[in-house]
Image (tube, grey):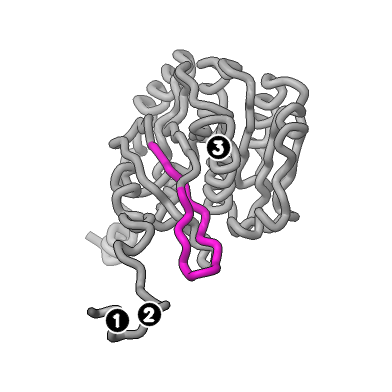
Amino acid sequence: MPADSRLFEKSSPPFRAPKNRFPEDLRRAVRRLEGRPEPLDEAAGLLPFGIAPIDQALGGGLARAALHEIAAASEAEAAAATGFALALAGFSAPARAVLWVAEEMAHRESGAPYGPGLDEVGLAPEAVLVVAAAHPRDVLWAMEEALRCRAVGAVVGEIRKANAVDGVASRRLSLAAARHQRLALLLRARPETQPVAAATRWIVGAAPSPKRALSAVGPSAFAVRLVRNRHGRLGSWTLEWNRAEHRFELAPTHSQPVAAEIVDRPHSAAVA
């Protein structure tokens, strides 16, 4: 065999048959026709809480490219659920805008996200865009449209009306979140029994805030229950918000010492 022929054979890359994408493409087409949500895209990443029991239940963290439902334990605890949702949105979109869509009635009753409060959860006020919609269907439409926008990192939709989100609407949001690699959060004023195509469902209420000093106000505390998890276990936790580091922490088992230190008696009397 000539030398130049041997050189040509050595320098040629080995032949590799093209990967057959037909089975996976067929499965995706069937899922779309059946209206089922896309599986979670691992390339989109997870949002770890940094709290071992929660991350283990979620399989490593909250799925970024998915729809998640957050409901207040009661209407009186809507502020706690709102703070929880904004914190998750801040985790997912540190460098992009967060779109907050709510019914006009919700704006009149509870107001829009407040600038100093956004700073507390690590969100720049100028990065949060607030949209008011007349009806729940308009909230859902705006959410789906916003998920297609590259400048938006997370979309939060607040709906007060009960049973306003059916399976078809939630599947559309779930598919849009997975397809465009965005976080979609559906915020409800109270827990719903109607199933939705969300990867997780959380029920969030307020928890007692422990004091860290004699006259200081303690951190915000949340009673959090994970009642639906498509890819893992369920659980309940009491979380505190770390204002300095902008992250959640597990609340201590005992919010107050068992016995307070005696400060108003001499040492000899205190130990007598």
Q: Earlier in the sequence, mark 3 or mark 2?
A: 3
Residue 228 seen anywhere in this rendered image of the structure: yes
Residue underneath mark 2: 265
Residue at position x 28%, y 36% from top? 233
Where residue 61 appears, x then y in whole percent? Answer: 38, 48
- N-terminal label among 3 and 1: 3
95 w.r.t. 98: above or below: below
Neighbour tally class for label 1: few under 14, some 14-19, many 20 plus, Cα within 10 Å? few
Judging depth in this view, the residue of 181 and 205 nearest the camera is: 205
Residue 142 sits in quarter: top right
Give percent across and percent down for residue 219.
Answer: 51, 59
Q: Looking at the picture, does residue 90 appear above or below residue 167? A: below
Query: Which SS does the magenta portion mostly show?
Result: loop
In the image, 58 versus 260, the foreground residue is: 260
User: What is the total number of numbered labels drawn onto the structure image?
Assistant: 3
153 or 88: nearer the viewer: 88
Disc 3 versus disc 2: nearer the observer: 2
Q: Of the residues tagged 3 and 1, which is closer to the observer?
A: 1
Type of the residue with mark 3: Glu
Label 2 sits on what residue type? Answer: Arg
* Callouts 2 and 1 close, C-beta under 8 Å: yes
Q: Secondary structure at mark 2?
A: loop
Residue 77, disc = 3
Q: CA distance from mark 2 to mark 1?
A: 6 Å
Quarter occupied by the N terminus: bottom left
- On the image, which quarter does residue 17 sit in? top left
What residue is rendered at 51% in x and 29% in y?
A: 174
Instruction: Identify residue for label 1.
Output: 269
The boundaries of the magenta stretch are 208-225
